[in-house]
Image: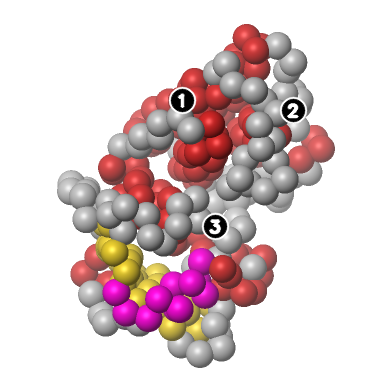
Amino acid sequence: MTFSADRYYAELKGEGARFAETIDGADHGVAVPTCPEWTLAQLAEHVGQAHRWARTIVATRATEMPSRDAVPDAALPEGPAERDAWLRAGAADLVAVIREAGPDAAVWNFSDDPRAIFWARRMTHETLVHRADAALALGRPFQVDVAVAADGLDEWFSLVSLPAMLARRPAVRSERPQSLRFEVTDADGDGPRRWLLNRGQDGVRMERDGAAEAQADVVVRGPAKELLLVVLRRLPVGAPGVEVTGDGSVLDDWLANSAF
């Protein structure tokens, strides 16, 4: 974890509010190009349901993945004011439940660190990327703190290198060894700024910072926000400020096979 528990609580609650602000006053029938076949209403409902699903996991101290059908208050309200309150409450209530349980409370998740704080970090970045989806669909501004965007990269690379993710998405493995290095160019302070991903038949192995300085088949460098959106396939590889050197086909293959 890059941040303290309190920082993740603040970021999660803030992202819930920022998502609600981003879609405020918009036509909820608008298509969301970065989430094919979804409208803005479906995107908003997904975000609110994800918060409530994670809340259920922590509140019940779940030891296995619960059914999403068991999530209470899962429908997006009809009225604009009710929708806004529902979206804000989802993130805020999740934060409150994690605080009450304690960040180290044992709960189910799909990582190798079964603690409640996992859900604060995961839902921070889940909400952030869908805020980007909404902003891109509506042509509205999207800003994110550099350190938060860098943590989003670290969290994503950590997830895709998990054995559980390999079982869910076998295509992340590669029949021939491939290596990719990603570097943030505008971040300082605490937290990783460079990641090396080694793909092979056994899946993905991730290394950070000093351990990530080995040569790679392709190197992708750029500002944290733009690099995050490229990695998550919300912006094209040629996004402003993003530089690719080496074998671009390795990056294309990774992006095509690492989406969830």
Residue 244 image point, x, y percent: 32, 69
* Amino acid type for the residue under numbered disc 1: Arg
Q: Check the image and name the residue furthest to the left.
A: 188
Residues rendered magenta in the picture? 245-255
Counting residues from the start of the chain, the first of labels 1 and 3 encountered is 1
Q: Which mark is in front, 1 or 2?
A: 1
Asked if 238 appears above or below 89 in the picture, the reply is below
Q: Is residue 247 magenta?
A: yes
Q: Which mark is residue 18?
A: 1
Q: Which residue is mark 3?
A: 111
Q: Is residue 202 magenta?
A: no
Counting residues from the start of the chain, the first of labels 1 and 2 encountered is 1
Q: Check the image and name the residue furthest to the bottom.
A: 176
Residue 33 image point, x, y percent: 61, 45
Q: CA distance from mark 1 to mark 3?
A: 27 Å
Q: Which mark is in front, 2 or 3?
A: 2
- Please rate how many residues cluster around mark 1, counting C-alpha atoms within 10 Å: few if below 14, some from 14 to 19, many from 20: some
* Amino acid type for the residue under numbered disc 2: Ala
- Please rate how many residues cluster around mark 2, counting C-alpha atoms within 10 Å: few if below 14, some from 14 to 19, many from 20: some
Q: Residue at x 21, y 50 (%)?
A: 186
Q: CA distance from mark 1 to mark 2?
A: 20 Å
